[in-house]
Image (spheres, helix red, strand yellow):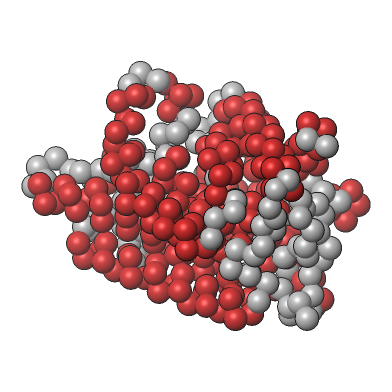
Amino acid sequence: MTAVRPALATEVRGARLSGVDVARAVALLGMVAAHVGGIADQLDWSDPSSWSALVNGRSSSLFAVLAGVSVGLVSGRQHPPGPPEISRVRRRLAVRAAVIVLIGLVLMGLGTPVYVILPTYGALFLLVLPALRWRRRSLLVAAGTCALVSAPAAIAIVPLYAGAGTFGVQLGLVYPVVTFLTFVLVGLAVARSGLEARGTQVALLASGAVVAATAYVVGSIAAPVPVDAGDAFPGVPFVPQGSSVGQGFAQVFLSPRDHSGSIVDVVGSAGVAVAVIALCTLLVDGRGRVAERIATPLSAVGSMPLTVYALHLVVIAALPGLPQSAATWWWFVFGAVVVAVLWQRFLGRGPAERLVARIARSVVP
């Protein structure tokens, strides 16, 4: 029998999966590394010093896939409810989405040199509401469609951001909605697969790893990352000057560059995210209390993602001269773990998560 902690608060009751919290902590700490860790700009497998660039793009995509998993877990897991319960779940999720967008806008107002994902994150919660009762196959078909049109959609919206300024650019350009909707739909499909079962975890781990490896191998052969890709804007495809039509087409649709929005980037990132989630649940859930206690530092961080994410941006804003280095990242990790473990131990749910849930319940009793 799977050993899991009691659910803190789910719309449709079920055991809380510690492995999902651990995966969420991996995503959070990966994004923190991208913001303060002084990591490499581009990944080069022949250069071990550049391997830290793995967190670029893949951390935010993992965060988005986990958003879909969370939506699936609070809306019935393998068996989403019918009316009228599903209507109540949708309304509560809509209220939570609005609050998350508002928190994101406030954090953007701090002026930190970080692209804030929360406004897009909240918008994705709203967009996925009609899909809560879709079958797993329908979710994957929709995700595949989004992956196919991700790059053209990102290119199409670029003119809308001419002269938008740093604040405006963060709203839908750096984290394109179509691209990240792919990840949320994949996460929802994962939650509908019965993530608690050991066989499902193994199957997801294997399939995610194979899909990611295949995508990146194809992309690396068909559209190698250009040497001047450092000039590329995150979220938008990049085609070097002087490229032929064929080379340009390959860079738009098959580039393995992170944040490129290509089919390879989206599918590869989704595969990595699914494999990470499956691995975390496989190693933690159902392994007994010893495994869960070992995972406590990470599961505590992952149980309050909104709180940890917001706090790390507040710290960056409060310390503008913060050096970008591995040491800085470790201090953030240490602070996040200490705060999360102590807060969970003595106060339970994270403060931001508690606030959002309280607002949702007050609006939708």
Q: Position of residue 135 (x, y in %)?
A: 53, 60
Is residue 317 visible to us here? no
Q: Nearer the viewer, residue 20 or 26?
A: 20
Q: Position of residue 11 (x, y in %)?
A: 76, 51
Answer above or below: position of 15 versus 68: below
Disc tally is 0
For this view, does 355 lie left or right of residue 186? right
For this view, does 239 lie left or right of residue 211? left
* Rendered image quadrant of residue 359: top right
For this view, does 169 lie left or right of residue 327? left
Is residue 217 visible to us here? yes
Answer above or below: position of 138 versus 34: below
Q: Residue at x 63, y 56 (%)?
A: 72
Q: Residue at x 54, y 55 (%)?
A: 134
Outermost residue toward the top in this view: 163
For this view, does 236 lie left or right of residue 358? left
Q: Residue at x 69, y 38 (%)?
A: 91
Q: Nearer the viewer, residue 263 or 170?
A: 263
Q: Position of residue 70 (x, y in %)?
A: 65, 54
Q: Which quadrant: the C terminus?
A: top right
Answer above or below: position of 310 versus 181: above
Outermost residue toward the front in this view: 83
Outermost residue toward the right in this view: 346
Q: Residue at x 38, y 41 (%)?
A: 234
Q: Nearer the viewer, residue 231 or 304?
A: 304
